Image (cartoon, rainbow, N blue to C red):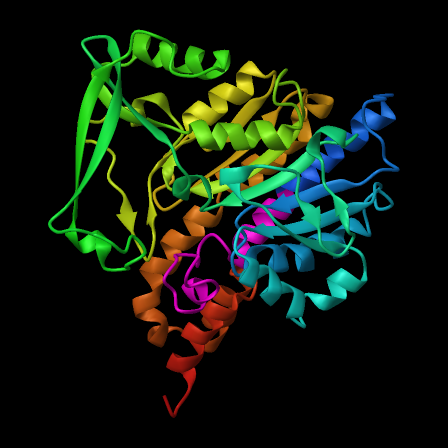
């Protein structure tokens, strides 16, 4: 929060993979699949969907806004050709830092989308979840009041919000309580050098009562306790609270939502097994691996499902959670996810990008152009390609 937008401008926060045009295109493909399912449900007489009312696409913790900017350019030209082109679909950029909202409001590249009524901005803090005020529309976006499902993007979001840690020891579920120690008194907790002096100590405390007031959360943990061997794992309790909030029904868990999220994390139960306590990854702030499996289990218990690649995505896990009743059975959404993620998505592209970067000087001009087309004309990649080709570089 202290650095504001500088965290992205100075590459403090990793974002090359999560905000790229390739990622934006993948999300655009999946959103189109979901909208095709919604449209098919309307055509079949589903009265719970109202094509005269908006569908909101909300990005959480959007930071620089680069992902949604690329999404806008890909999505809306395609929407004009769709049978549901008249359905009002609006995008909202959110963050919890006011200076970032001010940056978006003043950015000339975003103004045309604002003036067209397709883009709005809002403050949203996961630590104090309340319906956000849309700044341009001057109306409050209340998830529970929406007649249509919300679509939410959450890239590098769940890894940087609070989550709990548990230990399973000899079949007993324990809270894994953390003590943070420093080598000296720390009067200034905002000191950026603080992490250099900290050490973390975990202590397992046996649980004799259910840890949460939510039965679904407790059921997921009970299943882990029953089926997993001794292990240490994280549980995305605040992340699940956030999913419930955007579902629009914090009590019955029957709201509908499409959640698209990319982060470092685990989608399979076997990948949760670890002998190590969770340690933060430091990159200007800190982050923890995301237990996407628990989020998927929550979606399933709410009548939905989580789509994920059957293979481990080495750089970034991308998932689509359909929470609540799934329009038209989610057939088009599943097909779009398979094409955009499973059969070659942002993680695969980033792996190739990392491998090819040292060899760009050996590329011919046609090869560089092919590479740029595959990247969806990524400006960062263009910069990397330009220097090897420039005679004066």
Q: Which residue sits furthest left?
A: 183
Q: Quadrant of residue 301?
A: top right
Residue 23 among those drawn in magenta:
yes
For the C terminus, the image quarter is bottom left
Using the image as rendered, state which of residue 252 and residue 98 is in the foreground.
Answer: 98
Point out residue 104 in the picture as x, y percentages from the top left corner.
Answer: 62, 64
> Residue at 36% across / 71% down in the picture?
360
Point out residue 28 in the picture as x, y percentages from the top left corner.
Answer: 64, 47
Residue 306 among those drawn in magenta:
no
For the N terminus, the image quarter is bottom left
Using the image as rendered, state which of residue 362 and residue 83 is in the foreground.
Answer: 83
> Residue at 48% across / 44% down in the picture?
344
Answer whether residue 80 is visible to the viewer in this image: yes
Point out residue 225 in the picture as x, y percentages from the top left corner.
Answer: 31, 11
Answer whether residue 364 is visible to the viewer in this image: no
235 up-or-down from 385: above or below: above
Horizontal relation, residue 156 to residue 301: left or right: left
Point out residue 149 in the picture as x, y percentages from the top left corner.
Answer: 71, 31
Total numbered circles: 0
Q: Which residue sits furthest bottom?
A: 392
382 up-or-down from 133: above or below: below
Using the image as rendered, state which of residue 296 and residue 392 is in the foreground.
Answer: 296
Using the image as rendered, state which of residue 6 and residue 81 is in the foreground.
Answer: 6
164 up-or-down from 217: above or below: below
Q: Quadrant of residue 385?
A: bottom left
> Residue at 62% across / 33% down in the picture?
246
Horizontal relation, residue 196 to residue 110: left or right: left
Magenta segment boundaries in residue numbering:
1-29
């Amino acid at each position: 929060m202290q650095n504001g937008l500088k965290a992205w401008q100075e590459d403090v926060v990793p974002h090359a993979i999560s905000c790229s045009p390739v990622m934006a295109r993948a999300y655009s493909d999946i959103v189109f699949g979901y909208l095709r399912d919604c449209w098919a449900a309307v055509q079949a007489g589903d009265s719970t969907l109202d094509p005269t009312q908006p569908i909101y696409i909300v990005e959480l913790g959007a930071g620089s806004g680069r992902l949604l900017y690329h999404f806008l350019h890909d999505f809306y030209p395609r929407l004009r050709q769709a049978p549901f082109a008249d359905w009002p679909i609006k995008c909202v950029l959110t963050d919890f830092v006011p200076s970032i909202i001010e940056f978006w409001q003043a950015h000339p590249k975003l103004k045309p989308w604002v003036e067209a009524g397709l883009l709005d901005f809002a403050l949203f803090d996961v630590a104090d979840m309340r319906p956000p005020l849309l700044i341009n529309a001057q109306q409050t976006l209340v998830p529970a009041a929406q007649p249509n499902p919300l679509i939410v993007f959450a890239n590098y979001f769940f890894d940087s919000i609070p989550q709990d840690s548990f230990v399973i020891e000899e079949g007993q579920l324990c809270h894994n309580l953390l003590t943070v120690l420093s080598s000296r008194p720390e009067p200034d907790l905002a000191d950026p050098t603080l992490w250099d002096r900290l050490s973390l100590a975990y202590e397992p405390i046996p649980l004799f009562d259910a840890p949460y007031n939510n039965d679904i959360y407790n059921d997921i943990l009970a299943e882990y306790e029953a089926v997993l061997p001794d292990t240490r794992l994280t549980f995305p309790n605040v992340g699940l609270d956030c999913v419930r909030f955007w579902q629009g029904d914090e009590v019955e868990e029957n709201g509908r939502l499409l959640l698209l999220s990319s982060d470092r994390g685990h989608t399979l139960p076997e990948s949760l097994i670890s002998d190590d306590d969770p340690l933060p990854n430091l990159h200007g702030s800190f982050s923890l691996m995301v237990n996407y499996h628990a989020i998927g289990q929550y979606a399933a218990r709410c009548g939905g499902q989580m789509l994920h690649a059957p293979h481990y995505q080495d750089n970034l896990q991308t998932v689509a959670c359909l929470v609540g009743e799934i329009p038209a059975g989610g057939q088009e959404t599943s097909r779009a996810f398979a094409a955009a993620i499973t059969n070659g998505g942002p993680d695969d592209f980033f792996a190739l990008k990392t491998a090819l970067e040292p060899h760009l000087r050996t590329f011919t001009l046609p090869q560089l152009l092919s590479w740029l087309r595959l990247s969806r004309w990524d400006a960062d990649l263009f910069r990397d390609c330009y220097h090897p080709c420039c005679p004066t570089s």
